[in-house]
Image: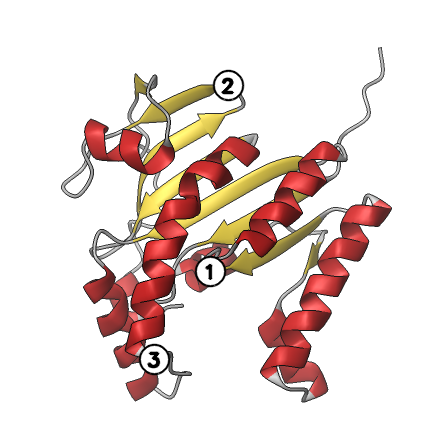
Amino acid sequence: MNTIKRPEVVVFAGPNGSGKSTITQLLKPIGIDYINADDIKRTTGCTDLAAAQAATKLREEHVAAGKPFCFETVMSTDRNLNLIQNASEKGFFIRTYIVLTCDSAINVSRVHGRVQSGGHDVPVEKIISRYNRSLKLIKDVVAASHVCNIYDNSSQYPVRFFNKKVHTCFYEENLFWNLASIQELTGIQFMQTRLLNLHNPFTKLDFASHPTT
């Protein structure tokens, strides 16, 4: 029997300074549209607001047309959560990669380091407030995703500590996250322990030396 592959939305989410842009460049799929406000601003010369609005419009148009796409987001508001929930209802397969740290102070320090290297700045209060809001929304993001991987990037390279595959969830404790804190973060109470980093593609990369977003 022939099966029709569902269109896919691939999401890279995480607070400012978590390192999600670096992971996005490494893991984003080939052959589907990557819709990014920074790229739109760079190619058109428009304002930040206009670029964000254009990216939102493009993503919504892709959902309406049933076209697969990929994007990166801080995910600190309901806007993109609503987008993937709507896409799921329309038959899309939702795959998410969440990148975070164990403490917003790490994010603040990394954004400051990025600025020193010529990158764009984000006010400290925004970094912290977005960090807190992003973590609160993770339960809903996990629930909306068919496949979800969560990485902690508090140290030299990202370490995966949570994996969801449709209805089955796995975890691996590390220095920063134990079972109780993973359950609280994800809203998932029943999960199986599994080694999630046997083939970690990031171990040979020094994320600490890269400007992070």
In the picture provided, is 135 more to the left or to the right than 74? left
Identify the residue at horizontal 46%, vertical 60% (top origin): 74
Please say if 51 is above or below 13: below
Rounded to the nearest angstrom, the CA distance separating label 2 from label 1 is 25 Å
In the picture provided, is 158 more to the left or to the right than 97? left
Residue 123 is marked as 3
Classed neighbour count for the residue bearing mark 1: other residues with Cα under 10 Å, few (<14), some (14–19), many (≥20): many
Identify the residue at horizontal 34%, vertical 17% (top origin): 190
* 3 or 2: mark nearer the eye: 3
Q: Which of 181 and 114 lies nearest the eye of the viewer? A: 181
Rounded to the nearest angstrom, the CA distance separating label 1 from label 3 is 15 Å
Q: Which residue is mark 2?
A: 167
* Amino acid under disc 2: His
Q: State the image coordinates of residue 123 (x, y, percent, origin top left).
A: 34, 80
In the picture provided, is 121 more to the left or to the right than 97? left
Quarter assignment of residue 108: bottom left
Rounded to the nearest angstrom, the CA distance separating label 3 from label 2 is 39 Å
Quarter assignment of residue 172: top left
* Amino acid under disc 3: Pro
Earlier sequence position, callout 3 versus callout 2 = 3
Q: Which residue is mark 1?
A: 74
* Amino acid under disc 1: Val
- Which quadrant is the N terminus positioned in? top right
Identify the residue at horizontal 38%, vertical 82% (top origin): 121
